[in-house]
Image (tube, helix red, strand yellow):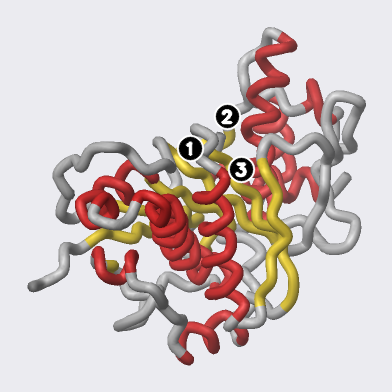
Amino acid sequence: MIRSLIVLALWAALPTPAQVGSAALYTNFEQTPAVPVVRALQEEVDSLMAQSGLHFEWRSLPEQNFATWTDLAVVKFSGRCDVLPFAPNSQIDQRLGWTHLYSTDVLPFAEVDCDAVRAFINRQLLALPAQSRQKVLGRALGRVVAHELLHIFARSTAHSDHGVDQPFLTVSDLMADHLDLSQKEAAIVRTSPAPSMQAREGSPAVGKASYEQAGCATCHGANGEGSRRGPALHFSDRGLNAIMLAAKLAKSQPKMCQRARNLNVAPPSISEDDLPDLVRFLSEH
């Protein structure tokens, strides 16, 4: 959906011997994991992020209704987020998760590679009693998610030198019984500034051309006012900006692609370079 975005990645390293309040957290799994994995993942994220005063309402994609949130994040999980009965070789410098950037702004959507996380810890995971493995895997995935959420809600590419927000997490970090945010990490989320409106001034005429070329009007109306096929591309309680538009597109991608297939039309494809122009066009209608 959003093409050619820069990514801010979390890498794995083998060990030697936002805003305060509520936000929607949308998850999209390539393969649905076991319930204990999901439960442990959510509990770990909630526990870690609560230290910064941030609380989530968990939502799943694709959703059945069109909800609008002032603050949200979208996390996509690729691969298989379950325990496997064998131990592949751990990979050094394997990217576990990443957050997308638009220019210098951190966008509110991230991705986690479940296969990479599982491969990284699987030898140690399989050494545990079978009844605890799913919980430990879910907890490890939760720590990778929390790392990316710190970037999203702090609107920062910075890392700390320890804790969840360090740039390299070890097997021990992911499997430890307890891992905290540092005071520095929590403070970053609490004092983060709002994102910039956009990286450059957009052109409404260019935005209109991009909107029409991408086929957005088929579902969202000629000016983004919405129709029976798709919701309005505006926010009633705050001005539209490139950050929120990118999040809206990322959150809605699975449903939009399915709807495009049902209508026998090409799915919309928007470049990050199109965002400022689309924002100007949609904001003027």
**Of residues 261 and 55, the one drawn nearer to the viewer in this rendering:** 55
Quadrant for residue 35, please give it.
Answer: top right
* Residue 23 horizontal side relative to residue 18, left or right: right
The answer to the question of whether label 1 and label 2 lie on touching residues, with beta carbons closer than 8 A, is yes
Residue neighbourhood size for the residue with mark 3, other residues' Cα within 10 Å, grouped as few (<14), some (14–19), many (≥20): many
The residue tagged with tag 1: helix, strand or loop? strand
Residue lying at the far left in this picture: please name it: 17
Determine which residue is flagged by label 2.
269
Q: Position of residue 93 (x, y in %)?
A: 19, 55
* Residue 60 horizontal side relative to residue 29, left or right: right
Residue lying at the far bottom in this picture: please name it: 183
The residue tagged with tag 2: helix, strand or loop? loop
Residue 57 visible to an observer of this rendering: yes
Q: Residue at x 79, y 45 (%)?
A: 282
Q: Residue at x 63, y 34 (%)?
A: 253
**Of residues 219 and 144, the one drawn nearer to the viewer in this rendering:** 144
Residue neighbourhood size for the residue with mark 1, other residues' Cα within 10 Å, grouped as few (<14), some (14–19), many (≥20): few
Q: Is residue 42 above or below residue 158?
A: above
* Separation of marks 2 and 3 at Cα, in angstroms: 11 Å
Q: Amino acid at mark 3?
A: Ala
Q: Position of residue 66 (x, y in %)?
A: 83, 41
